[in-house]
Image (cartoon, coloured by chain):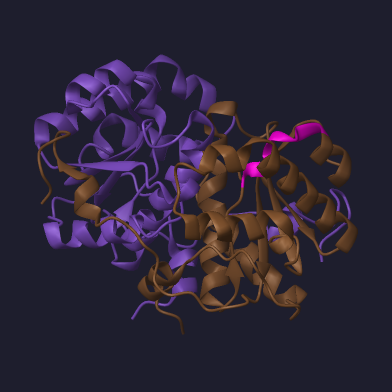
Chain colours: A brown, B purple
Amino acid sequence: MTDFFDVVARQRAHRRFTDAPVDDATVERLLDAAVRAPSAENRQPWEFIVVRDAAIRNALGDLMTRAWDSGGRQWSEPRISEHLLADVESGMHGGFAGAPVMIVAAADLARTTEATVGSSLFPAIQNLLLAASALGLGSALTTIATSFGSELRELLALPDTLRVVAILPIGHPVKQLGPSRRDPAREHAHRNRFGTPWP
Amino acid sequence: MTDFFDVVARQRAHRRFTDAPVDDATVERLLDAAVRAPSAENRQPWEFIVVRDAAIRNALGDLMTRAWDSGGRQWSEPRISEHLLADVESGMHGGFAGAPVMIVAAADLARTTEATVGSSLFPAIQNLLLAASALGLGSALTTIATSFGSELRELLALPDTLRVVAILPIGHPVKQLGPSRRDPAREHAHRNRFGTPWP
């Protein structure tokens, strides 16, 4: 039994993984958690590609590297700490692709509209990431490679109606991470109208 | 102690609420869970407006009613079951606004880009909804009123950089709901490439 609030407090982004395998039954538990999430009109427009094949994982990793090296790093550099930048850098250069499983999450635009892709996919993705955390696995929410639509389509044999929204490396983390760093909720909460302090 | 996987399995959309109050300490637990979620570059671009004021809740409800009556119902009618349609109808016509608390979730575009609004807000929103479920509360993920940007801005005194992405009614449900209806995960999962069956 894993306490819900403990799982939420423990979720971190992992960017390097060991070679220890993650079996199909475990992946299935992640997918089962994902599909319990809400979606617009309960249309469940998600499709998940579970990538174990090393060549495809490396090709996904190459897209991340290209996106990072051709603009991502430059964008993030002035915005994030040196420590986080180095960690992201290691993920983009082989860390994410080194996970034994990468789950590609896509929206089927035949079952949702452009306007509801985010509200219909990211709750399921968050369920999946939390479930990984509940099972002691490491994971991360990455979106940087989603701009390579046609390359992802070819690599993963995606129908035209599918749009990749995230790539989620799943594995055993190289190191256990401490609690996440967040602003207290009250710094971003308001009562009745913006600017009236909560609580 | 509330088991993570039980909470995930139990989450439902509630559309009618009793008058029983939800105290500030409980709302604070929901917000604390929300801000543990990941966001692009850990920029935490979320702002939450906790609306208790009945006039503002009713105004939010009116926007939902208008959006539903002026196109939402017509769009959904051929797509969802008669039972679900009737339930959504009751939510849009006063059910959602009858919750003692409505939490408006907004993205600050000064702290995120258009492209990362969804991946940075909906994981936090899902944490909040799951936390409500863990505490025995009812909730729902609604986005229908977000199209009324300028009216929401005026009603909630939002700065220009804020964009509302969801409105979450929170309260005690009129009735306990059974398990959610979802396709099995395997119907939407693939191995390595789309179309190769999982598992």
Q: Along the horizontal axis of the image, is A114 left or right of B167?
A: right
Q: Along the horizontal axis of the image, is B176 left or right of A149?
A: left
Q: Is residue A146 covered in magenta?
A: yes
Look at 17% across and 42% down and name the residue there: A190
Viewer-proximal residue, B173 or B105?
B105
Q: Along the horizontal axis of the image, is A128 left or right of B159?
A: right
Main SS of the magenta part reads helix
Seen in the picture, residue A8 relative to A1 is either above or below; the reply is: above
Look at 24% across and 57% down and name the residue there: A184
- Which region of the structure is painted magenta? A143-150
Q: Position of residue B31 (x, y in %)?
A: 27, 55
Q: Along the horizontal axis of the image, is A77 left or right of B130?
A: right
Seen in the picture, residue A10 relative to B147 is either above or below; the reply is: below
Q: Position of residue B125 (x, y in %)?
A: 39, 49
Look at 33% across and 31% down and name the residue there: B92
Viewer-proximal residue, A83 or B38?
A83
Q: Quadrant of residue A161?
A: top right
Viewer-proximal residue, B76 or A13?
A13
The answer to whether any part of residue A115 appears in the image is yes
Viewer-proximal residue, B101 or B41?
B41
Seen in the picture, residue B44 relative to B26 is either above or below; the reply is: above
Q: Is residue B62 covered in magenta?
A: no
Residue furthest bottom as drawn: A1
Q: Quadrant of residue B198?
A: bottom right
Q: Position of residue B12 (x, y in %)?
A: 43, 55
Q: Quadrant of residue A74?
A: top right
The answer to whether any part of residue A42 appears in the image is no
Q: Position of residue B29 (x, y in %)?
A: 24, 62
